[in-house]
Structure formats: structure tokens, C-alpha cells
Amino acid sequence: MTGTDEFGFPIARGFPTIDTPGMAQVDLLMVQFYGISLPQMMENAGCALALVARRRYLPGDLADRHVVVLAGFGGNGGGAMVAARRLAGWGAQVSLVPSGSADALKGMPADQCAILKAMGILPGEVPRMPPDLILDGLIGYSLRGAPEGRADALIDWANRQDAPVLALDVPSGFDAINGTPHNPFIRADATLTLALPKSGLQDGGAANATGALYLADISVPPALYRRLAPPLDVPPFLDGDIMRLL
Ligand SMILES: NC(=O)C1=CN([C@@H]2O[C@H](COP(=O)(O)OP(=O)(O)OC[C@H]3O[C@@H](n4cnc5c(N)ncnc54)[C@H](OP(=O)(O)O)[C@@H]3O)[C@@H](O)[C@H]2O)[C@H](O)CC1
Ligand SMILES: [K+]
């Protein structure tokens, strides 16, 4: 470890990068070989996002701090909704803004949204009250070309706000593999990527889309990476489950 950043997160070097096929192999091995489920990984991802949000942007009393959570319909949205739950539990005022009708949510994102509804956090449109922080959970590593529709509009909205944007895994609209930004893409103040940095995010990505780059441990056993083709030699998260990479 080479010290900590200004928010107390250990600064790390030496983590290899991974591409989307590699990530897909990781997810498969996690579930099929280790029996670690996607909801378990999502819970680690969302809790880490909430911790970075609190320590980097919302120090002290969260009671009157307002966080807008932009949530897509995939795993990225699910992780952001876990963070929404944790931040609300710590006292923050959370506005949940899905990238489509919440009734159309399926699978884990639908489950996460149902929990938030039970907590009284109802999905809606972007709020008029300016937020202190925006969480970008619109699109992660499964980006398919330039953002369209509601995701496009919400990315533009977020980029126009004064509030900083903290992106989950990949700034939405940014291609995590070849490192190219589509139009539009989230101009993140910071990004928390998961498991390993995606190949397109090294040195902050072509357009410095990521802002500060953090890496969260979502409980992938280092031995799993040696099963990949080609095998990766990945150091364990010895100094904390959230590391500062850039
Ligand atoms: N092992 C891990 O790293 C884990 C990562 N997690 C998180 O999951 C996402 C990947 O989740 P996935 O469900 O594969 O997809 P995404 O959430 O990245 O994105 C899919 C949604 O985005 C929409 N999309 C895609 N491209 C566009 C576009 N150009 N314009 C508009 N919308 C787009 C897509 O819409 P569809 O119409 O295609 O359905 C989906 O709604 C990863 O990044 C992590 O955040 C897991 O939580 C745990 C393990
Ligand atoms: K994102």
C-alpha cells in the first residue's frame, strides 16, 4: 500500500485490468464454481458505493443531505439502489430516478426497488430541489452503443447539475473496454469500479470520464482469477475493501 487518499482510502497499485468477456467469465465462475450469487455481489457493490458517497461527499450528519440516484434496468441500477438503501438508512434524503417506468423493472433491480418502496422511497422524475450528490447507476459494462432514450436524457441532466456525480462501475455512456466515450457520457467526479478495473478505465479513460477511480472488493476469491484464460495474478484487498487507483 502506498498511503491513503484525502478521504482515508488506501492507495493501491498493481491491480491488472479486465475486459467484458473476462468479467463475464468471473461472474460465471463466481456463481457456478463458488456459489457466490449476483445479489451477494450486488450487495457488496452497493454498500461500497454508499461508503464512498458518504466519506467523499457527505461527511458528518446526513440528515439534510439530498442524493439523487439514477438507476438503470440492469445490474448497474440494482447496485445503485442498494447504495440508495444504505444512504437512506444513514439518514440521507434519497430521490430514486429510474431510467424508465419502475413497473417495467424485472429481476434484481425490481427487488431492490421494492425494498426502497417499502422504506418509503418511491421512484419518480428528477427532483426540482438541487441535489448534494448524484449516483450514476444507469449503465455499467453492458453499454450497447451511444446512450438512447431516457438514459440519454438523464446523462445530460446529470452533466448539467452543479452536484458531483459518483458513477458505479463505469460512467454511463463510457465504453469500459476500449475506453471511448459515446455521446453523451457521464462526466464523473469519481467512479467506483468493481472487482477489477475495466480495461478502458486505465489512466482515467480517454476523456478522463472517471474522475477519481476507486476499486471495490465484491468478494471475488483471488484464486478465481487464476482460472481465467489467460490467468490473472490479482493481489488480495489487504488494506481495505475499497482502494483508490487514480
Ligand atoms: N462482477 C461484477 O463486476 C458485477 C457487476 N455488477 C453490476 O452489473 C453491471 C452489469 O449489469 P448488466 O445487467 O449486464 O448491464 P448494465 O446494468 O451495465 O446495463 C444494462 C442496462 O443498460 C441499458 N443500456 C445498454 N446500452 C444502452 C444504451 N446505449 N442506451 C440506453 N440504455 C442502454 C440496457 O437496456 P436494454 O434495453 O439493453 O435492456 C439495460 O437496461 C456492472 O456494470 C455492475 O455495475 C453486478 O451488480 C454484480 C457483479
Ligand atoms: K454507471
Image (cartoon, rainbow, N blue to C red):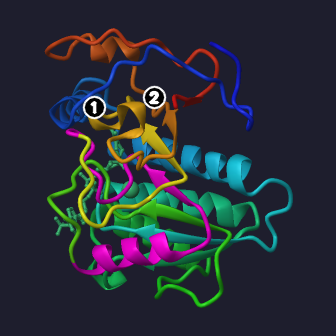
Where does the image place residue 67, in percent across and percent down from the top left?
63, 70
Q: Which residue corresponds to mark 1? A: 199
Q: Is mark 1 within 8 Å of ligand 1?
A: no
Where does the image place residue 92, in percent across and percent down from the top left?
72, 68
Q: Quick check: marks 2 and 1 in contact, CB under 8 Å?
A: no
Q: Residues within 10 Å of mark 1 (few under 14, many from 20)?
A: some
Check disc 1 and give the amino acid type. Ser
Q: Which residues are magenta?
A: 149-178
- Tell me which residue sits at (29%, 30%) in the image: 30
Q: Is residue 6 above or below residue 157?
A: above
- Tell me which residue sits at (26%, 10%) in the image: 226
Where does the image place residue 63, in percent across and percent down from the top left?
81, 70
Left or right: 11 as drawn, with respect to 125: right
Q: Is residue 230 above or below residue 47?
A: above
Q: Which residue corresponds to mark 2? A: 219
The residue most toward the right is 61
Q: Nearer the viewer, mark 2 or mark 1?
A: 1
**Mark 2: which secondary structure?**
loop
